[in-house]
């Protein structure tokens, strides 16, 4: 996947993985640790591009949206 860097006019030749948590890390039921582990694993196997890793799923940055009502990320068909 090639993502254009608008400010530089080039393409990405690295793997960039964004992640987060629905609940902060300090909360007992947080998914933060799990998401960080999944993100680290994704870094090892994905081709260059920008991705979001949440809840054990990997999404290409241009194929995902956040469903606030369902409290999850969903792939754009």
Image (cartoon, rainbow, N blue to C red):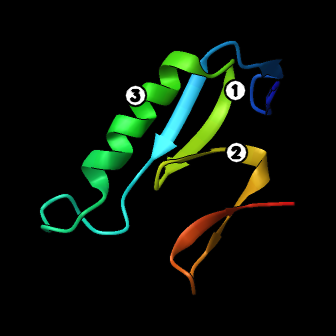
Q: Can you say whether 53 is above or below 64 in the image?
A: above
Quarter of the view holding residue 40: top left
Q: Are marks 3 and 2 in contact (CB under 8 Å)?
A: no
Label 1 close to label 2 by CB (< 8 Å):
yes
- The residue tagged with tag 1: helix, strand or loop? strand
Question: Which structural element holds mark 2?
Answer: helix
Left or right of residue 21, residue 13 in this image: right
Q: Is residue 42 above or below residue 65?
A: above
Up-down: is 57 above or below 5?
Answer: below
Q: Give the alpha-carbon distance from disc 1 to disc 2, as whole Å.
A: 8 Å
Q: CA distance from mark 3 to mark 1?
A: 15 Å
Residue 44 x/y as whole percent = 49, 17
Percent x, y for residue 70?
56, 82
User: Quick one: 10 or 51, which is closer to the camera?
Assistant: 51
Q: Secondary structure at mark 3?
A: helix
Front one among 50 and 72: 72
Residue mark closest to the camera, 3 vs 2: 3
Image disc number at residue 31: none
User: Circle 2 is placed at which residue position?
Assistant: 61
Residue 55 in the figure: left or right of residue 61? left
> Residue 24 location, x and y as percent?
24, 64
Q: How many marks?
A: 3
Report whether 26 appears left or right of 42: left
Q: Dot 3 corresponds to which residue?
A: 40
Tell me how far mark 3 sits from mark 2, CA to CA. 17 Å
Q: Earlier in the sequence, mark 3 or mark 1?
A: 3
Which quadrant of the rendered structure holds the C terminus?
bottom right
Residue bearing the label numbered 1:
49
């Amino acid at each position: 996947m090639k993502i254009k860097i608008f400010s530089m006019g080039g393409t990405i030749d690295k793997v960039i993985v964004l992640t987060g948590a629905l609940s902060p890390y300090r909360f007992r039921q947080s998914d933060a640790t799990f998401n960080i582990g999944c993100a680290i694993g994704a870094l090892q196997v994905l081709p260059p591009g920008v991705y979001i890793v949440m809840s054990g799923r990997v999404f290409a940055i241009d194929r995902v949206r956040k469903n606030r009502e369902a409290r999850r990320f969903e792939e754009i068909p």
